[in-house]
Amino acid sequence: MDSREIKSGIFSVGAIDWDRELFDALIPLPDGTSYNSYLIQGAEKTALIDTVYPPKKDTLLNNLKNLSVDRLDYIIANHAEPDHSGSISAVLELYPSAKIVTNSKCKEILKDQFFFNDNQFIVINNRETLSLGDRTLEFIITPWVHWPDTMLTYLKEDKIMFTCDLFGSHYSTSELFANNEAKYMHAAKRYYAEIMMPFRKIIKKHLNTIADYDIELLAASHGPVNLNPNHMINAYQDWISDDVQNEIIIPYVSMYGNTTRMVEYLINSFVKKGFVVRPFNIITTDMGELIEASVDASTIIFGTSTVLGGAHPAVANAAFLLNAVKPKTKFVSLVGSYGWGTTVYKQLKSMLFCLQAEFIDPVLIKGYPGNEEYQQLEAFAGHIKEKHNNNTLSAAGV
Ligand code: FEO
């Protein structure tokens, strides 16, 4: 995509990756993504904020050439991950006198990855400013959104906060700006779940810092520029809060249909009790959807057949991922069917060590569920309803 002007002298010069299907060889990208890079022209100096994923570097370089940028003074590195820093070397080939401006942790990681020299850097401290003449950049060091090196850059006169990964979305669109329409917010929530949720508690602290700034535009390095920062910041306040919704998610796999029968019984029972239930057959599901659903869910109930005494590997994979992203889920349990014996509950519990949730005794049955087993499931659903009631969940009806 050609460069686009955000405001006079401020351009989006990065690349849209319409067709990318997977991020980090892990995260499905149903809407592609973008690697945003922003050019800021001041009266005396010119700065570039972040670069792009290396396979897209020609887009960035062509945009700079087409804007007749004959001098670049600063390359601001908000984050060392290569989707933003991987083209710094290519930009430096075009503008060899430009300095990389970043914090000390980001410098360390950039040097590990790209073998830059110390004299190529200007290292800044938290809240330090850099003048471009008539425009001023302020750097706010915000570790762990997404790596320990991350920082935000605030353009004071124009009230634009450049946030790199924070508030981003894997959402490719020809629109330069987004105004929090549903599809974009869905992508932003999914992005939060996949990338930011493990750092929920740290983000709370950073949001307090951000509240000190008057922000008219949020310019992340993935997805469109946000025209309504308060809406996005409020959404983050909700997602990072300890509040959960009256929702149960059930990631499950069934080999011979018995676990499916148990899951279907539970869905009906929970719906009658006023819950929203979202089952995910792990064999066919988009794992990003499951992780997004975990942002608000009060309860996760895994459903698995037994394979060699343990969980089906697909359910183990889902448990591993959910443990890594650390949802604020209050209750976790398990249902499933086995042939002759199982240690699946012990196994799954040990895999979910990052969740600060109460584990509820599972319902594990031998073979095909009959009346007695369905009664067990009914008692199990009732027990979970009681747990919800006792925890005064935010949604009504439980
Ligand atoms: Fe978009 Fe952490 O990189």
Image (cartoon, grey):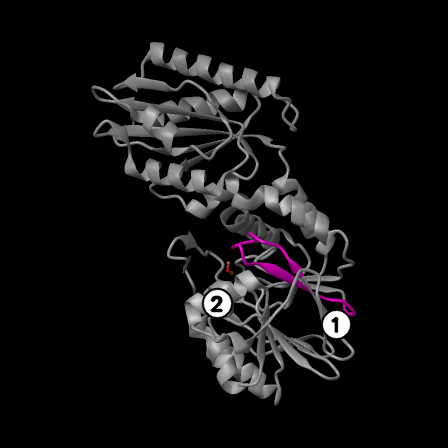
Mark 1: amino acid? Thr
10 Å crowding of disc 1: few (<14), some (14-19), many (20+): some
Whole-percent x, y for residue 275 in the image: 55, 26
Whether residue 79 is visible to the viewer of this picture, yes or no, is no
Mark 2: amino acid? Leu
Q: Is residue 388 above or below residue 12?
A: above
> Residue visible at 41% across and 33% down?
352
Q: Earlier in the sequence, mark 2 or mark 1?
A: 2
Q: Is residue 115 magenta?
A: no
Provide the residue designation for mark 1. Answer: 136
Instruction: State yes or no: Cβ of the residue under disc 1 lies below 8 Å from any atom of ligand 1.
Output: no
> Residue visible at 39% across and 26% down?
263
Could you say which is closer to the camera, residue 34 or residue 196? 196
Based on the displayed image, in which of its 4 quarters is residue 125 positioned? bottom right
Could you say which is closer to the camera, residue 242 or residue 102? 102
Residue range of the region highlighted in magenta in the rendering: 140-158
- Helix, strand or loop at label 1? It is strand
Whole-percent x, y for residue 28 in the image: 42, 54
Label count reads 2
Instruction: State yes or no: Cβ of the residue under disc 2 lies below 8 Å from any atom of ligand 1.
Output: no
Provide the residue designation for mark 2. Answer: 110
